[in-house]
Image (cartoon, rainbow, N blue to C red):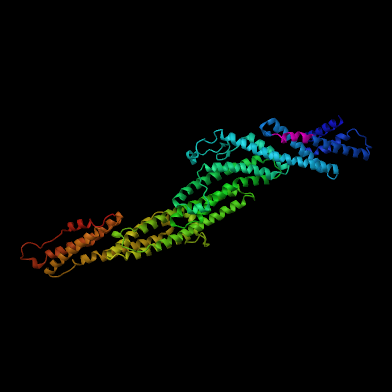
């Protein structure tokens, strides 16, 4: 009966400690006060020793009682957290055990205390292993009830689109943060986590938590239809397939860093709240996010290290800008020391994507150089290389800010009049014009050479006018290129129609005029027939050329016919000389010059 009374006394001491807001480990001090209550002021040292001895005995008996109570739970096959009463009782017993262990450590030095402390530590270890199992059980049970609770749509993965993914119930106070677990579950997990950290098993608790949440993230990510390609698979995949994967990747990254990870951070904070150290929270969050983050970054890295074919520029730019948008979010989410390597890796991959963009521009230059003048392009129209390069550059300039950031790797300051991007674009256009100069030599007819350069020059100028590309190239470039175009126009007329009109500019005798008229008709018919098959795609240019031709041919022909009719040799003859065309006939023929394609 005395032992039971002492045990009850110790239990009362713990209760008093809790009521006073003190740590239960203070029960030993309170026990000594209770044990000595009513004693006289002349208590001897033997009395104090006797009190200490009784305290040791009380702790030993409390340990025996806790060992019996806790062992009954540890050997149970069913989960302790399947019954709320059992779980509460078990946690109380764990608290008492940790308090007894704390008291024993404060009394270290005595052999009997050391034996008790060893027993307590062994029991704590068994408790921690069981709590680790229970922590996993609570998370698994929550996941199972979550899946059966229609939080996911229940459809097959193939039927779930990006906009349909529902991974958790929204929190009322957040627009984009989700609550993956119910508050009651979070409360149970927190209660277990607090005890595991107190028992020195914080890392083990973090490991169980992280593994379960990683599975949740992997499941959520799989619903976004990412293929999870390895570096080798990315290198071996057709580019068209990778373009689709990049689109899915950008959507997935947006979802992960705007919804999934902020939600996981919130959950970590709630599960591991009230802990004496924050490292468990930060470590757990890092372990939850690391796998998904690494998978996403590895894909972007594989693209960055892949082929530099020019057609890859636009999707590589999309990736570059997506990673750039990602980094500020990582700065916020991954601010602790455990997550810093993930953030640094993202920055490194963005740099590699920038290097890929520079490499792609170099490959574009090589592509232009390698496009040799083989055979004359039919009709002197716009060459495919011209269309490709100009449409390419216009599309690229939609990402002007990012391109300037990427290409500004030489240290030019922002106030410089010549930006690296403009230098790059002008250089590409110079290569294109040089390539076209080589191609024009494949034409045997000089006027067709100039028409070819005029067609392509007009296309280049139009594509660089009133848009971002023209803004980057600058007004000086536009003016110089327009002057080149006027020169091609002038050379075309001089090498073609000026020679035809020259036959009409003569003051020769009547017989010579008649001969020149015949030669003019033959030459006019020949040139009209030939140039009606030449191509001028741009309607404005086509009309300008026809107008220019008519402007030099019609007045010269009208004047020639007038001189012919007024010639003295015609007097006394019957009728007028044969005039093959009226001025209107000529102009009608001229309107038939050049076809659209």
In the rendered image, the residue lying farthest to the bottom is 508
Looking at the image, residue 39 lies above or below residue 479: above
User: Can you tell which quarter of the image residue 207 is in?
Assistant: top right
Give the residue drawn at x 20%, y 56%. 588
Quadrant housing the C terminus: bottom left
Quadrant housing the N terminus: top right
Residue 38: in magenta span: no
- Residue 164 position, x and y percent, is 49, 38
Of residues 65 and 516, which is closer to you in this image?
65
- Residue 529 position, x and y percent, is 21, 59
Of residues 190 and 68, which is closer to you in this image?
68
Give the residue drawn at x 44%, y 60%. 363
- Residue 574 position, x and y percent, is 5, 63
Looking at the image, residue 392 lies above or below residue 209: below
- Residue 301 position, x and y percent, is 53, 54
Of residues 393 and 517, which is closer to you in this image?
393
Q: Main secondary structure of the magenta part?
A: helix
Left or right position of 525 against 108: left
User: Can you tell which quarter of the image residue 486 is in?
Assistant: bottom left
Left or right position of 139 against 195: left
Q: Is residue 278 visible?
A: no
Give the residue drawn at x 87%, y 31%. 2
Q: Which residues are magenta?
A: 65-76
Task: Count numbered badges in the picture.
Answer: 0
Q: Is residue 15 visible?
A: yes
User: Can you tell which quarter of the image residue 143 is in?
Assistant: top right
């Amino acid at each position: 009966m005395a032992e039971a009374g002492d045990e009850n006394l110790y239990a009362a001491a713990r209760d008093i400690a809790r009521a006073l807001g003190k740590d239960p480990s203070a029960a030993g001090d309170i026990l000594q006060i209770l044990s000595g209550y009513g004693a006289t002021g002349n208590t001897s040292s033997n009395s104090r020793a006797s009190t200490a001895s009784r305290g040791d005995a009380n702790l030993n008996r409390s340990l025996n009682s806790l060992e019996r109570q806790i062992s009954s739970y540890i050997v149970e096959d069913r989960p302790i957290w399947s019954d709320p009463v059992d779980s509460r009782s078990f946690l109380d017993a764990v608290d008492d055990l940790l308090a007894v262990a704390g008291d024993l450590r404060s009394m270290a030095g005595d052999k009997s205390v050391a034996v008790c402390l060893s027993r307590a530590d062994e029991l704590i270890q068994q408790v921690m292993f069981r709590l680790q199992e229970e922590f996993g059980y609570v998370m698994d049970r929550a996941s199972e009830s979550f899946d059966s609770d229609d939080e996911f749509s229940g459809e097959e993965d193939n039927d779930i689109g990006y906009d349909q993914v529902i991974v958790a119930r929204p929190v009322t106070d957040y627009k984009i943060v989700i609550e993956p677990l119910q508050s009651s579950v979070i409360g149970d997990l927190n209660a277990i986590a607090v005890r595991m950290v107190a028992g020195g098993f914080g890392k083990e608790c973090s490991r169980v938590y992280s593994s379960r949440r990683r599975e949740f993230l992997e499941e959520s990510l799989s619903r976004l239809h990412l293929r999870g390609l390895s570096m080798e698979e990315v290198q071996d995949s057709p580019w068209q397939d990778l373009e689709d994967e990049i689109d899915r990747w950008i959507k997935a990254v947006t979802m992960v860093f705007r919804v999934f990870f902020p939600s996981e951070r919130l959950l970590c904070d709630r599960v591991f709240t009230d802990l004496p150290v924050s490292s468990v929270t930060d470590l757990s969050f890092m372990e939850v996010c690391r796998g998904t983050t690494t998978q996403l970054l590895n894909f972007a890295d594989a693209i960055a290290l892949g082929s530099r074919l020019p057609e890859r520029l636009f999707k590589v730019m999309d990736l570059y800008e997506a990673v750039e948008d990602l980094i500020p979010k990582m700065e916020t989410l991954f601010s602790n020391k455990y997550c810093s390597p993930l953030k640094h890796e993202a920055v490194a991959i963005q740099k590699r994507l920038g290097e890929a963009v520079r490499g792609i521009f170099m490959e574009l230059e090589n592509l232009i150089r390698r496009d040799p003048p083989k055979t004359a392009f039919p009709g002197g129209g716009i060459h495919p290389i011209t269309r490709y390069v100009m449409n390419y550059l216009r599309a690229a300039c939609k990402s002007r800010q990012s391109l300037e950031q990427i290409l500004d790797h030489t240290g030019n300051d922002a106030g410089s009049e010549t930006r690296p991007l403009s230098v790059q674009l002008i250089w590409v256009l110079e290569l294109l014009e040089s390539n076209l100069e080589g191609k024009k030599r494949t034409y045997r007819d000089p006027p067709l050479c100039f028409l070819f350069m005029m067609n392509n020059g007009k296309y280049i100028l139009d594509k660089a006018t009133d848009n971002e590309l023209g803004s980057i190239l600058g007004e000086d470039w536009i003016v110089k290129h327009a002057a080149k175009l006027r020169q091609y126009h002038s050379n075309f007329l001089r090498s073609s129609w000026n020679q035809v009109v020259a036959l009409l500019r003569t003051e020769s005798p009547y017989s010579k005029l008649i001969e020149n008229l015949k030669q003019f008709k033959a030459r006019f018919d020949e040139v009209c027939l030939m140039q009606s098959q030449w191509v001028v795609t741009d309607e404005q240019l086509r009309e300008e050329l026809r107008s220019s031709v008519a402007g030099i041919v019609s007045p010269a022909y009208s004047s020639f016919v007038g001189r012919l009719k007024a010639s003295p040799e015609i007097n006394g003859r019957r009728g007028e000389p044969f005039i093959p065309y009226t001025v209107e006939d000529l102009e009608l023929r001229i309107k038939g010059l050049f076809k659209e394609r």
